[in-house]
Image (cartoon, rainbow, N blue to C red):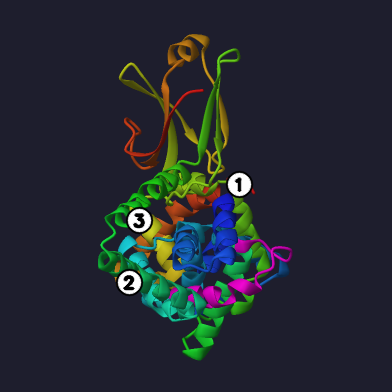
Amino acid sequence: MSKTDNLAYEYALGLLTKEEKADIDLTPEFLAEVESVHLKLCALQLQTPLEKDSSTKIWDDISKDIKSESNSWQEVLASRFRMWLYVLPAVFLAFGSLLLFEQTSSMSSPYSVEVLNAKSGWEVNADTNNHQLSIASINPMLIGKNEVCALWVQKDGVTHFISTLPNSGDKIVTMDAKIAKMLIGGEAIISIESDNKPIKVPTRIEYRNQLS
Amino acid sequence: MEKNLEFYFVKLQQNKSQKNFKQIYKLTSVRLFGVILRILRRKELSEDCLQEVYIKIWNRIDTYDTEKANMMTWMSTIARNHAIDYVRKHELPIQDDFELSIIKDDQVHFLDNLEASDTSKQLHDCLGQLKAESKNVVFMAYFNGLTYENIAKAVGSPVSTVKTWVSRSLPILKKCLEGVHV
């Protein structure tokens, strides 16, 4: 690294005092170099630590502030809905209709199934002829900064790590023919793992399904 | 990330719920915090400003036009402009070496491309080669606007020691930043 290079980095990083900078010959070449370093340095902005506690607190404060915004028609609707949640059971009780009561309580079951399906927005298919596993993301993944999605196949009680997945969620994994054969009839698992630690077993399983 | 962000942005425009907005916050807050911290140079103020930025984004969500800019560029521009206003409004001292005019649109686009090309982790790994004290000095200078002298005082070491740390770290830093292909 040349002396000028060093100086441009020191200048752009802001390490020099006013007096030190006054001694530098600010030629157009040097200023262009500083500007170029400035642009490169902005990559550091992606490495800024935003502590988890601070991040949570900031969100809590945002959440309080934007609550009033949604007080409009959405809040009105929600409050009416909540009111009916209280009123309806009372009405049912008043009429002593146990049957109606059972119907309303049974409504929660299909709803929760739907939520589960929506969460597992993946399709993993095995192409046995070409020894390939194709992974397609239907709903985008929600992973943190230091997290990564991992694909596993579980067969006969043994879990095999296959690959990590790119942010797009879509990938085709080509395997050795023997391994591919061994995995036929297995269960595909997609988990979210920390990319700071070795990936050994699925920790946060987001999806599992029989390979088709 | 871009795909996730797009998904939740569309959802948010269809249904302006806190739940959808929280997902956007999770996906983008670190990046926007970096943009703001570089301008304000103080962590507490940057956190305060970050909060205001998200409230602004929430209020303006209906005005976002997909044709004009991608979401991250749009959000980063709001963050950058709000941070500059914040400096002026709170009459914060601006380092003599740091002019607000230097924060140009090409930096925002550069960051967009960097994220899209997924080289952020590569950069993170590369910077891992720096010794802790050298990395701290680089970050203290870049984000907190501290000179050699300020850093020496902050860490309780002679200026010459801090200069040695920097001179050892600059070739690695340069290599890491030049290894970032966008």
**What's the chain of the residue with tag 3?**
A
Q: Is residue B144 above or below residue A203?
A: below
Q: Which residue is under mark 2?
A: A87
Q: CA distance from mark 2 to mark 1?
A: 54 Å
| Count of picture labels | 3
Q: CA distance from mark 1 to mark 3?
A: 50 Å
Query: Which of the chains bears the disc numbered 1?
Result: B
Res. A174 image quadrant? top right
Q: Where is mark 3, residue-wise?
A: A104
| Callout 1 amino acid | Ser
Q: Secondary structure at mark 3?
A: helix
Whether residue A78 appears in magenta in the rendering, the answer is no
Magenta residues, dominant SS class? helix
Which chain is disc 2 placed on?
Answer: A
Q: Which mark is residue B117?
A: 1
Asked if residue A23 can be seen in this view, the reply is no
Examine the rendered structure and indicate whether residue A189 appears above or below residue A28. above
Query: Which is nearer the eye, A145 or B166?
Result: A145
Q: Is residue B25 above or below residue A111?
A: below
Q: Residue at left 40%, top 66%?
A: B140
Question: Which region shows up in magenta?
Answer: B49-71
The answer to whether residue A69 is seen in the rendering is yes
Q: Residue furthest top?
A: A178
Label 1 SS: loop
> Which of the two marks, 2 or 1, is nearer to us in this view?
2
A109 relative to A74 in the view: left or right: left
Q: Position of residue B75 (x, y in %)?
A: 58, 68
Residue occupying the point 55% across, 84% down: B85
Percent position (x, y) of residue A66? 45, 77
- With B15 as the anchor, is B42 left or right in this view? left
Query: Which sits in the foreground, A150 or A86?
Result: A86
Mark 2 residue element: helix
